[in-house]
Image (cartoon, rainbow, N blue to C red):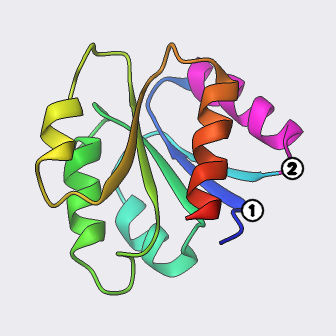
Amino acid sequence: MTITTILLVDDDGNYMNELEEFLVRNDFTVIKKNSTHKVLPFIKKNKPDLIILDYKINGMTGIDVSRILNNDPDTKDIPIMLVSNYHNSGSYEYKNNDSGIRIYLQKSSKPEVLLQEIRKIEIN
């Protein structure tokens, strides 16, 4: 699987801008959304190659969004990464449910770690 388009869903504008800059430098196309409102129809229509969700976003949690996508035959194969500032927020929850989240990272992780995880998704 080749990842070219990444959807970032986060209400922290500074984090999204920094991550977008890093991802664009690494040849990804980035689409940003700052809330979960209307994001589900957008994802279903546009089918990004990877979705990076914040745990706590305006609207639903990232786990809620992921669970909906994972249970939809049209979107269940889109890989999802959960990022958060909250220590251990959801790390147990996402591993023990049907959310479909493949990777959980702290926002404090270096961008290079995130890039490594994206490359792992491409290989698998």
- Residue 52 is tagged as none
Name the residue carrying label 1: 4
Q: Residue at x 21, y 57 (%)?
A: 99
**Quadrant of the drawing holding the C terminus:** bottom right
Q: CA distance from mark 2 to mark 1?
A: 7 Å
Image-quadrant location for residue 74: bottom left
- Look at the numbered discs 2 and 1 and tell me whether their residues touch, using CB distance below 8 Å: yes
**Residue 69 position within the rendered picture, expressed as x and y whole percent measured from the top left:** 30, 68
Q: Residue at x 28, y 30 (%)?
A: 56
For the residue pair 71 and 110, the one nearer the viewer reads as: 110
Question: Magenta segment range?
Answer: 14-27
Helix, strand or loop under label 1:
loop
Q: Label 2 is placed on what type of residue?
A: Asp
Is 21 inside the magenta-drawn segment? yes
**Residue 20 position within the rendered picture, expressed as x and y whole percent measured from the top left:** 71, 36
**Sequence-first disc among 2 and 1:** 1
Name the residue carrying label 2: 27
Q: Label 1 is placed on what type of residue?
A: Thr
**Quadrant of the drawing holding the N terminus:** bottom right
Helix, strand or loop under label 2:
loop
Give the overall secondary structure of the magenta segment. Answer: helix
